[in-house]
Amino acid sequence: MRKMHQTLVVSLAVVTLSGCATMLTSEQKREYHEFQAKGLVVKEKSPGTGAALGILPGGGSFYARAYGWGVVNLLMWPMSILWDPVSGYQGSMTINYYATKTHVESKVRNEIGHLDDQLVTGLVTKEEYVQKKREIENRYGTY
């Protein structure tokens, strides 16, 4: 009976921690949805594949690059089938969010850098610069 109680406690801890380890905050989800609406999302990982691989021992966590959790879920298999698909899905979404954010920030830096060069060389006026900078910021989101 004591062994079963310990297993239950460990399982609940793993379920709680594995879900929290990769989940996006509400602000990040909102930002990700904005990127989706603007067609800017970079998809490095498939959330569906992450969820499907979660059925295998540690597969969802390994797919989502959460190697420590992958080992834990491998050792907890078959109980990890209850939470690892969620970890694989959420981890894939997190990877895609950060890949997208990095990509968008790079594009914004490049376009504003080019615009800065145009201002310095006199190809655009200060007023045109401000207008074009706002257009860039609106195109990619709130920066």
Image (tube, grey):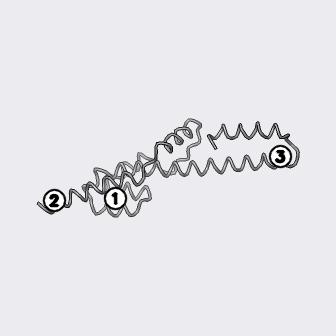
Residue at point 43%, 47% (across, down): 47
* Residue 1 pos. (x, y %): 11, 60
SS for callout 2: helix
**Residue reaching furthest to the right:** 122
Q: Residues within 10 Å of mark 2 (few under 14, many from 20)?
A: few
SS for callout 1: loop
Residue at point 35%, 50% (across, down): 85
Q: Amino acid at mark 1?
A: Gly
Residue at point 54%, 39% (across, down): 36
Q: Which mark is residue 118?
A: 3
Q: Specify whether 68 is left or right of 13.
A: right
Which of the two residues, 22 or 43, is positioned nearer the viewer here?
A: 22
Q: Residues within 10 Å of mark 3 (few under 14, many from 20)?
A: some
SS for callout 3: helix
The residue where tag 2 is placed is 4
Q: Specify whether 115 is left or right of 142.
A: right
* Mark earlier in primary sequence (1, 2): 2
CA gap, disc 1 to disc 2? 22 Å
Q: Amino acid at mark 3?
A: Gln
* Residue 31 pos. (x, y %): 54, 41
| Image quadrant occupied by the C terminus | top right
The residue where tag 1 is placed is 58
Q: Amino acid at mark 2?
A: Met
- Number of the front mark, 1 or 3: 3
CA gap, disc 1 to disc 3? 52 Å
- Number of the front mark, 1 or 2: 2
Q: Residues within 10 Å of mark 1 (few under 14, many from 20)?
A: many
